[in-house]
Structure formats: C-alpha cells, structure tokens
Image (cartoon, helix red, strand yellow):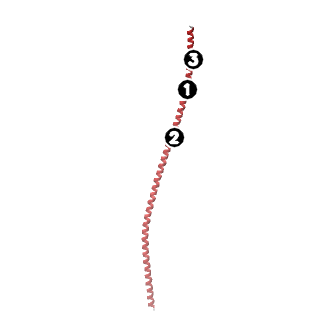
C-alpha cells in the first residue's frame, strides 16, 4: 500500500509539475499570442497609413493631371485665339497692301494725267505768249 501511495504521490507530484509546466506554456503562448496580435495590429495600422498615403498621393497625381490638362487646354485655346488673330491681321495687311497697290496705280494714272495736262497748259501758255508777242508786234507796227 505504501508503494501505491508513493506511486500515487509521485503521480500527483508529476501531475502538479505537468500542470505548472502547462500553465507556464499557456502563459508563454498567451504572451506570444498577445505579442503577435500587437505586431499584427501595428502592421495593419502601418498598412492603413500606407494606403491612406498612397490614396492621397494618387489623388494629388490625379489632381495634378487634371490641372495640367486644364492648363494645356487653356494654352491650346490661347494658341488658337492668337493664331486666329494673326491670320486676321495678315488678312488685313493683305487687303491694305492690295488697296495701296490699287491706290498707287490710280494715283500714278492721276499724276500722269496731271503731268499731261500741265504740259499741255505749258504748251498753251507758250503758244499764248508767242501769240501775245506777235500781237504786240502787230499792234506796235500799226501804231507806227
């Protein structure tokens, strides 16, 4: 009976040691699990922060693209407006040049006509002066 009691006491002692070891293992496992949970929570937080940062960066890039497209569209519109204005000015200059060439042709013809009229008037004046001299001579001869 002593032997059975000793075996039972040994078994109880072994069971207590096993229970203490199991408790230590459970506590260590719980601590490890808590550490893993904390590490996982931190990783999730970092992932969320990175996703927010990436999302913000994506929004900024999209906004920058929209702004650059708006600026490009405005610039293209301004270039079209300037090109249209340049074309209008070129057309105006062409019209003014054509009109000035027509004026030059008309004025040249007028100058030539005035020159012809002036020469004719000078010729007429010379003829009149000659006639006046001849008339003066005739008058002088008749007085005498």
Quadrant housing the N terminus: top right
Q: Position of residue 24 (x, y in %)?
A: 57, 21
Quadrant location, the C terminus: bottom left
- Dot 2, how many residues are within 10 Å of its Cα: few (below 14), some (14-19), or many (20+)? few
- x and y, in percent, of residue 103 in the image: 43, 67
Image quadrant in which you'd find residue 136: bottom left
Which numbered marker is on residue 103?
A: none
Residue furthest to the top: 1
Q: How many marks?
A: 3
Name the residue tied to disc 3: 17
User: What secondary structure is found at the residue carrying circle 3?
Assistant: helix
User: What residue is drawn where x is 54% and y is 30%?
Assistant: 39
Farthest residue in the front direction? Answer: 3
Report whether 5 appears left or right of 123. right
The relative height of residue 44 versus residue 62 in the rendered view (above or below) is above
Residue 42 occupies quadrant: top right
**Can you tell which of label 3 and label 1 is closer to the viewer?**
3
The residue pinned by badge 1 equals 32
Circle 2 is placed at which residue position?
Answer: 57
- Residue 132 spot, x, y in % from top left: 44, 84
**Helix, strand or loop for disc 1:** helix
Query: Marks 2 and 3, Cα distance to the nearest angstrom?
Result: 58 Å
Q: Which percent across, then down, holds residue 115?
A: 44, 74
Question: Along the horizontal axis of the image, is 56 left or right of 128?
Answer: right
Q: Which of the two labelled residues, at mark 3 and mark 1, occupies the earlier sequence position?
A: 3
């Amino acid at each position: 009976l002593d032997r059975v009691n000793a075996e039972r006491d040994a078994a109880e002692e072994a069971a207590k040691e096993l229970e203490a070891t199991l408790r230590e293992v459970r506590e260590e496992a719980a601590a490890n699990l808590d550490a893993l949970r904390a590490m996982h929570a931190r990783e999730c937080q970092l992932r969320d922060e990175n996703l927010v940062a990436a999302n913000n960066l994506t929004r900024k890039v999209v906004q920058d693209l929209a702004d650059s497209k708006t600026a490009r569209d405005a610039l293209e519109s301004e270039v079209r407006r300037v090109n249209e204005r340049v074309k209008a000015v070129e057309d105006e200059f062409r019209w003014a040049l054509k009109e000035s060439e027509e004026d030059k042709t008309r004025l040249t013809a007028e100058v030539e006509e005035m020159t012809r009229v002036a020469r004719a008037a000078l010729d007429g004046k010379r003829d009149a002066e000659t006639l006046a001299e001849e008339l003066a001579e005739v008058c002088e001869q008749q007085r005498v």
